[in-house]
Image (spheres, rainbow, N blue to C red):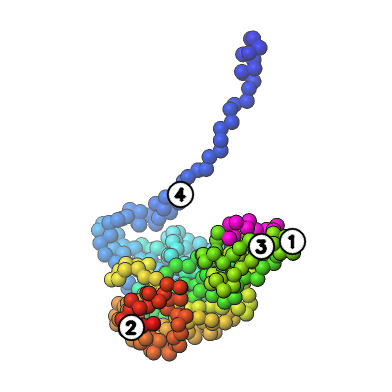
Amino acid sequence: MNTATATAATAAPKASPRRAIECGVPDNQQYLHPLLKKNYGAWKYHDRPRPGVLHHVARSGDEVWSVRAGTQRQMDVGTVRKLCDIADQYAEGHVRFTIRSNIEFMVSAADKVAPLIEKLEAEGFPVGGTGNSVSMIAHTQGWLHCDIPGTDASGAVKALMDELITEFRREEMPNRVHLSTSCCEINCGGQADIAIIVQHTKPPKINHDLVANVCERPSVVARCPVAAIRPALVNGRPSLEVDEAKCICCGACYPPCPPMQINDPEHSKLAIWVGGKNSNARGKPTFMKMVVSGLPNNPPRWPEVSEVVKKILHTYKEDARSWERIADWIERIGWPRFFEKTGLTFTKYLIDDWRGARVNLNASTHIRF
Ligand code: SF4
Ligand code: SF4
């Protein structure tokens, strides 16, 4: 063997760059209940024998009952194990979660439904959330996973759902009602018939000692939607300053620069928005509008928030026609009647409070500014 051959034989294999595996979400077929897999896309009809139970009949003649229960969404291992044990003992080993954090257990025989419901209720998981009920509140990660929350989303959900549990168990609303909570003003959350969203009311307080070490100043400046942040030298060190007359207190500067503290025990409030929906059934998807602002962020039970949400819900329940979502109801009666009927106080900061709102509001036949 010559020297060149020996060198080639002992050379390390050429390194190849490490690449991300773009696999996306896993294929859901592997997790489906066998009857759902067998009859995928071949269902004849479905109905609801009682609140909290969906009954699907396939063209093949197979039937599946799905029992829906409310959960606390952010679950400890003990609760997950408990739900899995219930799935194994009282259902057929398969569960799924809905977009509003309800859990559904599937069974293939009608006589398995009642014992399953009894067990779920006994373990503290209320059965309901189907049809024209108030479903579980979709909420954000809050203190558990996120570094910017201005309040505890799951705590507000717990306090509110304790008061709305009857409406979760029954289907007595004019149409389905989706609620959501967001613990900051900028990120999670989506459209909901009623949304509870943190509202900062003061510009951020800047800790100038930390800015130079912690924040990438150009990206913080770029983050502000109204160009209120400027680079500045403070005490001879590079820092930032905020034009408070421009600042809309959105909080967007806080995630990239925690020294721009916006959360405040007194001045971070909660606002209530209404009339959003994602669905395009009967009417197109709509954005929510703010109808109450400046509610105190008052843990552990947030009574002021509960009172307003219940007031809106009860007025909607009494006044809306069958199948009107909250947005449809308000569209029919108009914003002035919404405020009259709910007893909420209208101010110029509500409904649309962005700087171009005047144009929007003047497009309505109901309100002129
Ligand atoms: S709403 Fe905001 S604070 Fe709450 S989890 Fe989402 S990003 Fe974090
Ligand atoms: S709170 Fe919003 S508007 Fe105010 S400075 Fe920060 S990013 Fe700009």
Name the residue beneath numbered marker 3: 232
| In this rendering, the label closer to the viewer, 2 or 4 | 2
Q: Residue flagged by tag 4: what amino acid is it?
A: Gly
Bounds of the magenta segment: 210-221
Q: Is residue 127 above or below residue 39?
A: below
Q: Is residue 30 above or below residue 360?
A: above
Which x, y percent locates residue 95?
Answer: 44, 61
What's the residue at 37%, 86% (across, down)?
336
Q: Which quadrant holds residue 298?
A: bottom right
Q: Which quadrant holds residue 56?
A: bottom left
2 or 3: tag closer to the N-terminus? 3
- Which type of secondary structure does the marked residue at label 1 adopt? loop
> Toward the viewer: 155 or 250?
250
- Which type of secondary structure does the marked residue at label 2 adopt? loop
Secondary structure mainly formed by the magenta segment: helix
Q: Residues within 10 Å of mark 2 (few under 14, many from 20)?
A: few
Q: Residue flagged by tag 2: what amino acid is it?
A: His
What's the residue at 45%, 63% (across, down)?
97
**Residue 95 seen in the current view:** yes
Ligand 2 has an atom within 8 Å of the beta carbon of the residue at disc 1: no
Q: CA distance from mark 1 to mark 4?
A: 48 Å
Q: Residues within 10 Å of mark 4 (few under 14, many from 20)?
A: few
Q: Residue flagged by tag 1: what amino acid is it?
A: Gly
2 or 4: tag closer to the N-terminus? 4
| In this rendering, the label closer to the viewer, 1 or 2 | 1
Numbered badge on residue 24: 4
3 or 4: tag closer to the N-terminus? 4
Q: Residue flagged by tag 3: what amino acid is it?
A: Ala
The image quadrant in which ligand 2 is located: bottom right
Name the residue beneath numbered marker 1: 236
